[in-house]
Amino acid sequence: MSRLTAPDLLRRKTAGQTVDRIVMVTAYDAQMARLVDVAGVDMVLVGDSLGMVVQGGQDTLSVTVGEMAYHGRCVAAGLERAHLTVDMPFMSYQVGVAQAMRTAGTLVRKGKAQSVKLEGGVRSAPAIRAIVDAGIPVVGHVGLTPQSVNAFGGFRVQGRDQENADRILADARAVAEAGAFAIVLEMVPAALAAQITRELGIPTIGIGAGAACDGQVLVCTDMLGMDQRFSPKFLLRYANLEATITGAVGRYVADVKSGAFPTAAHSY
């Protein structure tokens, strides 16, 4: 089975009309990658959200390029069909175009990425253009950009007022003009996301950005309900694996302590 490519995904949107919605989900290891791939997702994102989901941090800012490459390799090993995008972490591209190109190259060579994702619009356009010119497909990311959490004062909806809505629209235009083949819109009002989706010739992938986007992305552990403490408005849980896992492990604990496991059937 052949892997989906950036041109395949770009063709999902023709003359501003979505032909087939894009489904993206995060994964951080080969096992989860295999499962979401079998389920039929189109894109798998190794997000720098691993700083929170895998490492237990409060934000994404401490993740390194080496860690992204490591998790990229792990996820690539589990994929047969889905396209693999890997995040460029904080301060791995903001210093300048040359740094951005080195980071993108590392994530392709060592992280097995088919494309890279970086945050920012107008300010990131030169880096996007250079990376694309080097032959590496790019996914943009505007709206709530988690690497700017300190500047935003937290994980908050962006673009509620006209000034910020105009800024996000300008950022989205800059990303598309720089050559990105898709763009993530995170936590922006649905009307703004719809406007961007109508205007751009590349697919928009929303998270907390309404139903008009050309696709959607969720964090795998969020949608599977592995941490019931996390419950943002945009999240729809499709399972309650926290209860399933803790229940199963609890039964194992009880069986070992009581001597019910292992039995003769589990012994050599």
Image (cartoon, rainbow, N blue to C red):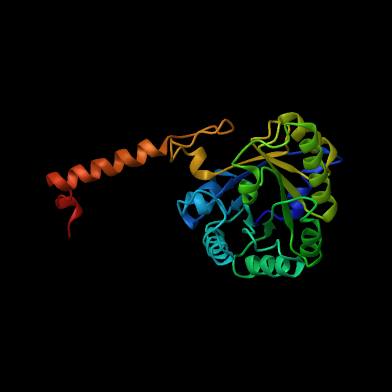
- Percent across and percent down for residue 63 are 55, 59
Q: Is residue 120 left or right of residue 229?
A: right
- Front-most of residues 2 and 154: 154
Q: Residue at x 60, y 51 (%)?
A: 44
- Front-most of residues 144 and 234: 144
- Percent across and percent down for residue 195 are 81, 33
| Quarter location, residue 153 | top right
Q: Is residue 11 left or right of residue 30?
A: right
- Percent across and percent down for residue 145 are 66, 47
Q: As drawn, which residue projects farthest toward the left?
A: 259
The answer to whether residue 34 is visible is no
Query: Measured along the vertical axis of the image, is residue 90 above or below residue 102?
Result: above
The answer to whether residue 88 is visible is yes
Query: Measured along the vertical axis of the image, is residue 179 above or below residue 234?
Result: below
- Front-most of residues 225 and 160: 160
| Quarter location, residue 116 | bottom right
Q: Is residue 124 left or right of residue 263?
A: right
- Percent across and percent down for residue 146 are 62, 47
Where the C terminus falls, by quadrant? bottom left
Query: Measured along the vertical axis of the image, is residue 50 above or below residue 112?
Result: above
Q: Is residue 259 left or right of residue 40?
A: left
Q: How many marks?
A: 0
Where the N terminus falls, by quadrant? bottom right
